[in-house]
């Protein structure tokens, strides 16, 4: 991975949110399948169609609550005649393939895809390019295929931040458990790679052991719960640190720890800065989360999509790096992740307007 620079989340999020908030008049409709089509107040045919294809609703609440509405709002602000067709694959790569094929058939000129399966989605890119459709790989990288653009965070850095936190908060000689994300998700591989870059040298030095490690099919918290229960059983509850790939898995890990009266006694990492994760941090049961300013990611992806829709070359000040996806170097926008703990919640997610203390204190009702 080659980076020219990394955008600062804290410096620019306020501007980004202001841009997203300024959308024009629009309407949307949702069918029973969860499909949403949104078009502006101009021509009924619009200047073109963009398909937003997201992977699931189980790995994180962000897709429905942030990515989808923020992306749609920014597209409408930039081009009120553009149409956005939205689909969610609910964790099924075959479903996502069918959704992409339907979007191409229905006239989409740009596909923005967060792939369920990073390798399987290469067939979508091939089909899209055959029809003259551009593809933006969103959040998760589509591998082994000539994607047009990639918008995400520095995902190895996410893993490094999680790994460093565990390194700093696990006792000498302790047992570390790693509950990674889905092995079909390239991001999950990058998170784990970054964590191992920090942890492996320390393991060799004898500071602690990685006593149990597994990947979690579909990022499913139910699978994460079973995995953590198995780790506790295998290690006779002698667990001194848990590197959880995201907040959804962390919630299940905490549930398993709580059953053994260990919640709050063992450092647990997370990612996504969900309200539930932040709530657990305030309670002292989760130790940290990695904050990724999703609204900024969605807004940047919308900007690229509209540029491609209008046959414009995206601004070189926005595209700030390249990423090798096994097919070549993909022009990329890579944003900066930030560690959030109980000590800096006010100075990060609250200050940026990412969430509110009311939502954090009452995550189930917001």
Image (cartoon, helix red, strand yellow):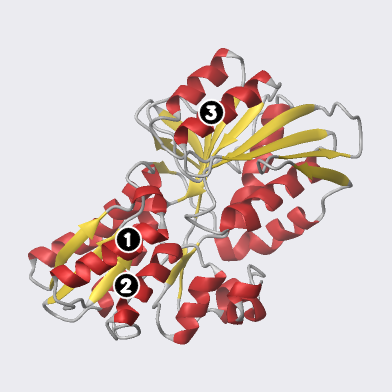
Q: Look at 77% across and 26% down and name the residue there.
A: 48
Q: CA distance from mark 1 to mark 3?
A: 27 Å
Report how far apart the C-alphas of labels 2 and 1 lie in the structure: 8 Å
Q: Say which quarter of the image contains residue 235.
A: bottom left
Q: Earlier in the sequence, mark 2 or mark 3?
A: 3
Q: Is residue 343 visible?
A: no
Which residue has dot 1 on it?
A: 160
Element class at badge 2: helix
**Is label 2 in contact with label 3 (beta carbons under 8 Å)?**
no
Q: Position of residue 227 (x, y in %)?
A: 27, 61
- Residue nearest the observer in this picture, 226 or 1: 226
| Image position of 239 (left or right of 62) | left
In this rendering, does residue 353 appear at all?
Answer: yes
Provide residue 276's location: percent of width, then percent of height. Answer: 52, 72
Precedes in sequence: disc 1 or disc 3: 3
Q: Quadrant of the C terminus?
A: bottom right
Q: Earlier in the sequence, mark 2 or mark 1?
A: 1
Q: Position of residue 311 (x, y in %)?
A: 71, 24
Q: Is residue 310 left or right of residue 323?
A: right
Q: Quadrant of the N terminus?
A: top left
Q: Which residue is mark 3?
A: 148
| Residue 165: mark in rendering | 2
Residue 86, quarter of the rendered image = top right
Q: Secondary structure at mark 1?
A: helix
For the point 14% across and 62% down, the residue is 201
Q: CA distance from mark 2 to mark 3?
A: 35 Å
> Residue 8, which numbered label?
none
């Amino acid at each position: 991975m080659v980076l020219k620079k990394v955008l600062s989340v804290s410096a620019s999020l306020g501007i980004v949110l202001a841009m997203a908030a300024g959308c024009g008049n629009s309407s949307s409709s949702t069918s029973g399948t969860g499909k949403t089509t949104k078009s502006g107040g101009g021509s009924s045919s619009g200047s073109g169609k963009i398909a937003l294809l997201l992977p699931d609703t189980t790995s994180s609440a962000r897709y429905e609550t942030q990515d989808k509405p923020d992306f749609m709002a920014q597209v409408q602000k930039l081009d009120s005649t553009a149409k956005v067709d939205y689909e969610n694959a609910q964790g099924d790569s075959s479903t996502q393939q069918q959704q992409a094929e339907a979007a191409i058939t229905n006239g989409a000129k740009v596909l923005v895809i967060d792939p369920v399966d990073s390798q399987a989605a290469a067939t979508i890119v091939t089909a899209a390019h055959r029809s003259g459709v551009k593809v933006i790989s969103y959040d998760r990288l589509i591998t082994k295929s000539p994607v047009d653009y990639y918008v995400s965070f520095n995902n190895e850095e996410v893993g490094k931040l999680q790994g460093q936190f565990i390194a700093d908060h696990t006792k000498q000689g302790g047992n570390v458990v790693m509950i990674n994300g889905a092995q079909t998700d390239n991001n999950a591989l990058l998170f784990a790679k970054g964590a191992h870059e920090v942890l492996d040298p320390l393991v060799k030095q004898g500071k602690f052991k990685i006593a149990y490690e597994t990947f979690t099919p579909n990022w499913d918290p139910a699978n994460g719960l079973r995995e953590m229960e198995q780790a506790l059983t295998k290690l006779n509850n002698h667990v001194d640190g848990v590197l959880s790939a995201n907040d959804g898995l962390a919630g299940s890990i905490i549930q398993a720890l709580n059953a053994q009266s260990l919640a709050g006694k063992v450092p647990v990492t997370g990612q996504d800065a969900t309200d539930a994760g932040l709530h657990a941090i305030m309670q002292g049961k989760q130790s940290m989360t990695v904050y990724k300013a999703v609204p900024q990611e969605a807004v940047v992806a919308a900007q690229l999509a509209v540029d491609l829709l209008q046959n414009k070359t995206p601004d070189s000040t926005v595209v700030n790096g390249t990423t090798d996806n096994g097919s070549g170097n993909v022009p990329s926008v890579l944003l900066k992740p930030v560690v959030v703990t109980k000590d800096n919640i006010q100075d990060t997610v609250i200050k940026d307007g990412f969430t509110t203390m009311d939502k954090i204190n009452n995550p189930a009702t917001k």
